[in-house]
Amino acid sequence: MFILLEKEHGSVSSYLTRRILYAFPILIGVNFITFVLFFVVNSPDDMARVHLGNRYVTENSINNWKSERGYDKPLFIALDNSGKKIFTETIFFDKTVRLFTFDFGQSDSGRDISYDISERMWPSLFISLPVLCLGLLFTLSFALLIAFFRGTYIDSSAVILCVSMMSISGLFYIIGGQYLLSKLLQVVPISGFDDGVASIKFLILPILIGVVGGLGHGTRWYRTIFLEEIHRDYVRTARAKGLSEKGVLYLHVLRNALIPIVTGVVALLPSLFLGSLITEAFFGIPGLGSYTIDAIQSQDFAIVRAMVFLGSVLYILGLILTDVAYTVVDPRIRL
Amino acid sequence: MELIILKTDALFFILIVCLLTYVFYASRKEHLARPWRIVLKRPIAASALTILGFYLIIAILDSIHFHPEIEGSSSEPIYSSQVVSLLDVVLKPINKNTETTYSAPFAIYSYSKESRESETGQIVRAYPRLTYAGSHLLGISEVRSDLVTRSLSGLGYWVFVMASLCLIVAVFKVVKLKLSLVAPRNFSWFLRPSPARLAAMITFATVCLLISMIAAVGPYYHILGTDKVGHDVLFQGIKGIRTGLLIGTLTTLIMLPFAIVLGIAAGYFRGWVDDAIQYLYTTLSSIPGVLLIAAAALMLEVFMTNNADDFESITARADLRFLCLCFILGVTAWTGLCRYLRAETLKLKESNYIEASRAFGALSWSTISQHVLPNLMHIVMISIVLDFSGLVLAEAALTYIDIGVDPSMESWGNMINGARLELAREPVVWWSLFTAFLFMFVLVLAANVFADSVRDAFDPRIRELD
């Protein structure tokens, strides 16, 4: 027994090691794409000019700006050097190595990126986490209810309702919600953010809109999963044993349907930190989403690089967590 | 008239040619035609397809661009530098009446007050009459009766159009198929139609009724009001159709070759090819999509500012930006399909017929084109129709955060973007938002409904469940 456990444990950790090692080339590739995207039309000189203001910039101040921020080396290949240094004495190598140690350094405008990220991830999380939890609660209960009434008019009209809700633009929910709750009823402020408990009144609307906006798609998706399970043999067996429809749904269908649901949710967890770009832009929430958009608009390459890197790390983490979650909820699957 | 073919126009026409070829080809192959017949047997899908057809016709009309001729004295024709589409010409009666500022739907007075000198010489602030809308009327009291008369004439147009269509079809049936008019069974498709055909006919008639109404009332009123600079909102909504439809279809057209070639190559050849392709799509999909789009949009902006002289018109510039948006959306979208195709190819490769084909010494190329690809087409089909609606919705959201289509291009995203602050006005300016959301909703709903039916018909696994 002990040996068996030991062995299984070993395979999980070796699997994880493999996955983590595999993440390195991917992250290097991600960083490479970011570099290419940024520098295909822009040279470091252009960046310096944008940040220093376009007029009256001397050659000297550009060089100063570049050397301060480490942009005074060649981009990808340093042909002046020999041996290994051809690749190591470049901006790309320099910045990539720093990212892997999670040393994001300073933004091009001189702020500490790690500090900014640690500050700004909370507002993002305050919105995305409740949206996920409440959304799951509502969509799962609705889907279960619809699955209970499958094949009736309730089912078909609910599906039509879901498809209609999916077809409405997310912008409509946001604009409509702001108009209805903030302007007509004046329950909550339109946008903004505050520290501590006072922030709740700013958070209600984006959370509500996030939940409502995802209702159509989520309900329909979970309904499909439930219906797939309902047609399985074990459900027929359970019915044959004389179990009530409710018992079948709660005891068997829900528990088995949880496998795809849990693994799907786990994949989302890491990206919750990043928040939603559009929601944050609309509601003026100082989260990571708006941080990234601002950085892109002000051409702050250091922040964009850090955020893209972080996003990819979280995505890969999500993939690994999904695989682990599979083995936890479904013992038939081994890594 | 001097024809102009924009890059997106060319791609759109290629796409339509592909579509027609596919329809022609599929109608001759029973195994391809059968699932489509199942789709078309559903009333709701037939109705959705009719609506999509109308959108498609408008997009095609809007994709034929030209420089209009300036009426001048010289014998040599002079062309305007403006780019105009066929749709602009068709909609000229609605579009030409530009007011000065906002006006509500069917209003004949302006939205905002203006100072004017009254007959007695005093300055009074009052709502001025609109320059064009309802200018043939004496006052507001006549609006209602005028609208009724014009709607009745719209109804008249509609009856006329419907009757002539029925007549044309009847004549066609008689002449082409040599059917007898007296035998009612020859017209059973019309007199006693199947539910799907009935749904399609009702939808068709309804849309035709709407068009007749617009044709009758549109030239004299702003049916959906005017925007900030006095342009007709209904016209903008219709113009947005091309952008919406193109973003959904061109993106797919651009990404499809990559997804198919790489997906099959990875699944079929395995080994280092598989590793390389897997690496490529994992890397691309691990970059958050919006970030990739935003970065690309910004880079394009820089590129266009640096090479501003290369574009002969604003339209050409907007067109390039639009094409790049489709391309980058395609880059973020192809990974999902590629992964799916790879997995499916892996499964197919184990099947007996592929093994037999290889055992007979068939080349990889012919095995793939004859056995693997045809068996993957249903996945491609499902993915095309499923992605479409998401892409239409994405355009509006991306345009809102300034990384979508060019501000000079007519699109629903730009309409929403320009009008979202107007809800704060008193009284509320709701018509721009309403129009954009309505046009978008109808397109996306039709696409979603159609996509559902296509998936049900093509995916054998789900078909078994029902």
Image: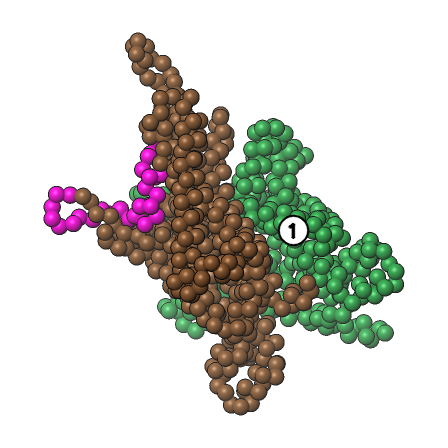
Q: Residue at x 52, y 69 (%)?
A: B33
> Is A232 rendered above or below residue B44?
below
Quarter containing the C terminus of chain A:
bottom right
Residue B8 shows in the view: yes
Can residue B282 be found in the magenta stretch? Answer: no
Q: Residue at x 79, y 72 (%)?
A: A6
Q: Position of residue B390 (x, y in %)?
A: 53, 53
Q: Residue at x 45, y 62 (%)?
A: B180
Between residue B180 and residue B207, name the one nearer to us: B180
- In the picture as drawn, the residue positioned furthest to the bottom comes out as B360
Q: Secondary structure at mark 1?
A: helix
Q: Is residue A311 left or right of residue A156?
A: left
Q: Position of residue A77 (x, y in %)?
A: 40, 67
Q: Which residue is mark 1?
A: A159
> Is B103 rendered above or below residue A333?
above
- In the picture as drawn, the residue positioned furthest to the top comes out as B120
* Number of numbered discs visible in the structure rendering: 1
Q: Residue at x 73, y 54 (%)?
A: A150
The local crowd at label 1, few if under 14, some if 14 to 19, many if 20 or more residues have their Cα within 10 Å, is some
- In the picture as drawn, the residue positioned furthest to the front comes out as B182
Q: Kindly indicate which chain is depicted in brown in the rendered structure.
A: B
Quarter containing the N terminus of chain A:
bottom right
Q: Is residue A120 left or right of residue A94?
A: right
Q: Is residue A214 left or right of residue A63?
A: right
Q: Kindly indicate which chain is depicted in green in the rendered structure.
A: A
- What amino acid does circle 1 point to? Val
Between residue A36 and residue B393, name the one nearer to us: B393
Q: Position of residue B319 (x, y in %)?
A: 35, 53
Q: Position of residue A265 (x, y in %)?
A: 67, 56
Q: What's drawn in magenta, residue-wise? A: B72-99
Can residue B79 be found in the magenta stretch? Answer: yes
Q: Is residue B287 left or right of residue B254?
A: right
